[in-house]
Amino acid sequence: MPDIRAGILQESEKPSFDCLRCGHCCQGRGGIVASEKDVRRLCGRLRMTVEAFAAAYGERRGGKLLIRAGEDGACIFFKKNEGCAVHTVKPDICRAWPYFRGNLLDRDSLELCKEFCPGIPPSLPHADFVLQGTALLQREGLIGTGGADEAGALQTADLFSC
Ligand code: SF4
Ligand code: SF4
C-alpha cells in the first residue's frame, strides 16, 4: 500500500493531472453514483425535488442512485462540444476522478487509467499521483467514509487512518 499519509502535507511538484475535456470519462452507463449529498447539491442548482430529479436523471441499482446515460451512451448531463452541463455541482465521483481508490492503491490500475484519460501525464509516477490525489481529496472534502449511497471508488477513509 502506498504511503497515503505522506500526501497530506504536500503535493508533488511533478507534472500533475490536467483535464483536457475529451469527455471519455463521461461515456458509458452505470458508473456515476450520486449520493444523497450529491443529489441535494444537484437539486438545489436545478431547482428540482429529489423525486423529480431521480425520475428525470436517475436510475436505482444495487441500493444506489446512478445518473442515467442518454441515447448516445454518455452521461445524460454530457453535452457534445460543451462538456458537463452541471459542472459546478457535479457528483463527487466526477470531482474525484481520476483519484479513485483503485488507482491510488494499484500502479497497474493507474497505468490502465492513463490509457483512458489523456489528462494524466503518461510519465507521472504512481507515487506522485498518490501525493497529488490524496491532497486533492482532502482539500475538496472527497474522502468517502463508506456510506451505503456512496461510490466504492470514493471510499478511501481507511487509507488515511494510522
Ligand atoms: S478522460 Fe480525463 S482528460 Fe478526458 S474529460 Fe475525463 S478527466 Fe478530462
Ligand atoms: S455529471 Fe458531468 S462530469 Fe459527471 S459524468 Fe456526467 S457529464 Fe461527466
Image (tube, rainbow, N blue to C red):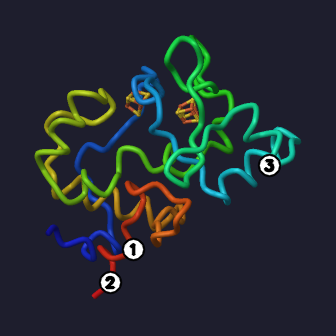
Query: In this view of the protein, which residue sits in the foreground, 50 or 154?
Result: 50
Local crowd size for mark 3, using a 10 Å CA cut-off: few (<14), some (14–19), many (≥20):
some
Would residue 100 appear left or right of 1 to someone viewing this image? right
Foreground mark, 2 or 3? Answer: 3
**Numbered tag placed on residue 161 in the rendering:** 2
Tag shown at residue 157: 1
Question: Which is nearer the N-term, disc 1 or disc 3?
Answer: 3
Find ligand 2 in the image and state its quadrant. Answer: top right
Task: Answer with mark 2 or mark 3, whichever residue precedes in sequence.
Answer: 3
Q: Residue 112 is drawn in which quadrant?
A: top left
For label 3, the SS is helix
Question: What is the x, y in percent for residue 36?
Answer: 67, 58
Residue found farthest to the front: 62
Q: For numbered disc 1, what is the local secondary structure? A: helix
Q: Are marks 1 and 2 in contact (CB under 8 Å)?
A: yes
Q: Of residues 133 and 62, which is closer to you in this image?
A: 62
Residue 49 in the image: state x and y as whole percent: 86, 47
Place of residue 10 in the rendered image (x, y in percent of width and height, measured from the top left): 32, 69
Q: Which residue is mark 3?
A: 50
How far apart are the two marked residues, 2 and 3, measured between alpha carbons? 34 Å
Residue 155 pos. (x, y %)? 40, 64
In the image, 111: left or right of 93? left
The amino acid type, in three-letter code, at marker 2 is Ser
Question: Disc 2 on helix, strand or loop?
Answer: loop
Residue in front for this viewpoint, 97 or 124: 97
Say which quadrant the N terminus sits in. bottom left
Image vertical order of residue 159 relative to residue 50, above or below: below
Mark 1 Cα-neighbour bin, 10 Å: few <14, some 14–19, many ≥20: few
Q: Which mark is residue 58?
A: none
Report the quarter where the C terminus lies: bottom left
- Residue drawn at x 51%, y 40% as measured from the top left: 32
